[in-house]
Amino acid sequence: MEESKKHRFFEHSIDLARRAWGMTHPNPMVGAIIVEAGEIVAEGYHQKAGNPHAEVEAFKNLDRKPLPGASMLISLEPCSTTGRTPPCVEAIIGSGIKTVFVGALDPNPAHAGRGLEILREAGVQVEMAKEALQQEASRLNFIFNHNITTGNPLVALKLAESANGMLAEVKGQPSRITEDEARADMMGWRRLFPAICVGSGTVLADNPTLTARLPEETFCPVRLVLDASLSTLEKSVLPRNLYSDEYVSQTRVLTTALGMKNEVAVKKADKLGVTLIEVGHDDTGRIELAELSGVLKELNLNAVYCEGGASMAQSLLGGDLVDYLFRYQSPKLFSGPKALPAPDLDALTIREPITAKLGEDRLTHGFL
């Protein structure tokens, strides 16, 4: 197969995988295509955990035996172990396909390359994508890759700052930092993550909904609120959107023993149908953020997108609890005396950074 066509097919397999954006947790997103005589005759992608894998979907959509000389391109190494579904290497070998092109290796050190070995032992020719495409195919599943290699959920932090490093024009009041293109991009990341997290200050000041509002749908991840004293549920505070909208069942409030002693707030949470989760506190009485990962595991959440303000961001960064950073930068200047400074993000080293121009704004994201 000529390189230009192979490149185009690999890009298509990655695009197929991306169709399941945020829907496959805790599994990776994977796309597969079947090619005969240089043309795509069937394709498939893994739609959600428990559903058939991409390769099986492609064979099902073909609805016949592949012709002699057919090949398959897959964005991720086919699985070689039995989980909720049989290993995909068996489906490939059984199909009679003799040439397979793979975008990225399985990130699990115990499985990486094993699927390729099984295929080769069965007489299947296997070829990896060029390095740039391997990186693209692998990066698509950065959450899954982190889960597999560390055994922990991925904690991501999102911050939007002005050109002079401010998070708000006036502390305690919402400020429009980025414009439409960047804000739409943030919605896309909210759609990827199974959970989103903010602090009580954000809930009180902004009254957010924390949903992913996309042209084709409105999606609500699990919404986590960090509120040590249950200040967001005080009698004097009108029910916030997170506690009163149609997605209230998706809201969880992490609080401390002090918060659980706030009987009025606890009763209000019960009346509103808001779930409270007690966690430990630090020396200042604030939520012990080191417990966030454990809470995520208990809730079967493999990642969280933290959108808190300066205090929450500083605590997460100071505790070395951030695995991945999204840094949005605006050309605006907030130079008033009441402006709220962001943590010093220039002091951080972002590994494997990806940058994007979003209108007048800029996004840099990568691992810490």
Image (cartoon, helix red, strand yellow):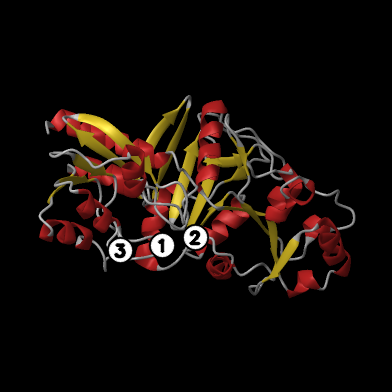
Tell me the quarter of the image containing the N terminus: top left
**Which SS class for mark 2?**
loop
Q: Residue at 60%, 56% (x, y): give it.
A: 312
Q: Residue under label 3, please give it.
A: 108
Spatial CA span between label 2 and label 1? 7 Å
Residue 147's label in the rendered image is 1
Q: Type of residue at label 2?
A: Asn
Residue 346 placed where, x, y %? 42, 47
Spatial CA span between label 3 and label 1? 9 Å
Q: Type of residue at label 1?
A: Asn
Tell me the quarter of the image containing the C terminus: bottom left
Residue 271 placed where, x, y %? 86, 59
Q: Residue at 51%, 51% (x, y): give it.
A: 157
For residue 333, which quarter of the picture? Answer: top right
Spatial CA span between label 2 and label 3? 16 Å
Q: Residue under label 2, please give it.
A: 302
Q: Residues within 10 Å of mark 3 (few under 14, many from 20)?
A: some
Q: Are marks 2 and 1 in contact (CB under 8 Å)?
A: yes
Residue 348 placed where, x, y %? 40, 52
Q: Earlier in the sequence, mark 2 or mark 3?
A: 3
